[in-house]
């Protein structure tokens, strides 16, 4: 659920160790328009990009205590867009001076037989969902406001229902390791969204 719409993610080559810096929050449905209006005034794009994505989360269980997790996502409203495979590392929560959660991030475009390949490799799908929302940009920062829909019939993305009466709000930056100064810029931007939404450095382990 924390992952941004990967159809918007730049696909980079080479061996650069990329990190995702992340702040998260939520806003109730009735406050959505006020938040969108505020973001239009603060961001580079007056009108947000929209996305409608289907994400499948795959697990590979081995000798380790925690399973290995990969995320496969495809765009449902952009014909011909590639599938994307995403790996998110364990969050680095120890540094109190960082104002954002930091984790390793690998994102690559793939062919459309990605899910078949993962199943052949021994992965099993754990859950799937549809994400629908808006994406704003401010410099290298991305601000996503989206709603999660549960899929009622496995594999049928036409049969969904909203998971909650709120929208997730994520402020993220993908940058090479060591660029911790970006978290200062993120904190300053997040302050401008208060009191409409409070974006925080959230440890996923607290939600389990």
Image (cartoon, rainbow, N blue to C red):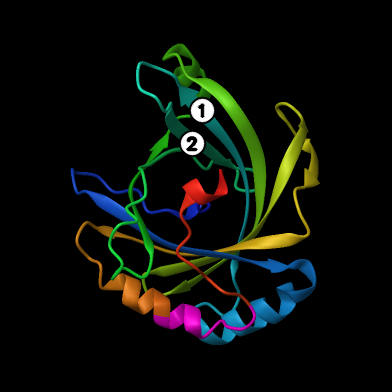
Query: Where residue 102 appears, x then y in whole percent?
Result: 34, 57
Query: Where residue 183 appears, x then y in whole percent?
Result: 33, 71
Query: Residue drawn at (33%, 77%), measured in percent from left and top?
Result: 184
Query: Residue drawn at (72%, 72%), measured in percent from left and top?
Result: 32
From the viewer's side, name the closer residue of 115 and 105.
105
Query: Where residue 177 appears, x then y in whole percent?
Result: 21, 56
Say whether marks 2 and 1 touch (CB < 8 Å): yes
Query: Where residue 59 appears, x then y in whole percent?
Result: 48, 25
Magenta-tinted stretch:
188-196
Residue 100: quarter of image: bottom left
Judge whether residue 114 can be spotted in this image.
Answer: no
How many numbered marks are there? 2
Per the image, the residue denoted by label 2 is 71
SS at mark 1 in the image = strand
Screen quadrant of the C terminus: top right
Residue 122: quarter of image: top left
Judge whether residue 191 can be spotted in this image.
Answer: yes
Which class describes the residues within 10 Å of circle 2: few (<14), some (14-19), or many (20+)?
many
Residue 116 lies left or right of residue 160; in this view the side is left
Per the image, the residue denoted by label 1 is 58
Residue 84 lies left or right of residue 92; in this view the side is right
Residue 157: quarter of image: top right
In reply to whether residue 191 is colored magenta, the answer given is yes
In reply to whether residue 141 is colored magenta, the answer given is no
Q: Is 60 drawn above or below residue 48 in the view shown? A: above
From the viewer's side, name the closer residue of 81 and 175.
175
SS at mark 2 in the image = strand
Tell me the number on the disc at residue 19. none
């Amino acid at each position: 659920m924390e992952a941004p719409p990967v159809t918007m993610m730049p696909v980079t080559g080479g061996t650069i160790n990329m990190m995702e810096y992340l702040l998260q929050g939520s806003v109730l449905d009735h406050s959505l328009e006020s938040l969108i209006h505020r973001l239009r005034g603060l961001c580079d794009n007056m009108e947000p990009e929209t996305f409608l994505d289907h994400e499948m989360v795959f697990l590979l269980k081995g000798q380790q205590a925690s399973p290995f997790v990969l995320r496969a996502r495809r765009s449902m409203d952009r014909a011909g867009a590639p599938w994307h495979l995403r790996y998110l590392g364990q969050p680095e929560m120890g540094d109190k001076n960082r104002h954002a959660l930091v984790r390793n991030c690998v994102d690559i475009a793939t062919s459309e037989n990605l899910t078949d390949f993962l199943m052949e490799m021994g992965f099993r799908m754990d859950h799937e969902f549809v994400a629908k929302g808006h994406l704003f940009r401010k410099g290298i920062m991305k601000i996503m406001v989206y709603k999660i829909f549960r899929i009622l019939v496995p594999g049928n993305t036409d049969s969904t229902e909203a998971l909650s009466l709120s929208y997730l709000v994520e402020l993220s930056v993908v940058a090479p390791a060591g660029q911790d100064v970006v978290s200062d810029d993120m904190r300053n931007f997040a302050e401008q969204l208060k009191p409409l939404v409070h974006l925080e450095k959230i440890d996923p382990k607290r939600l389990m």
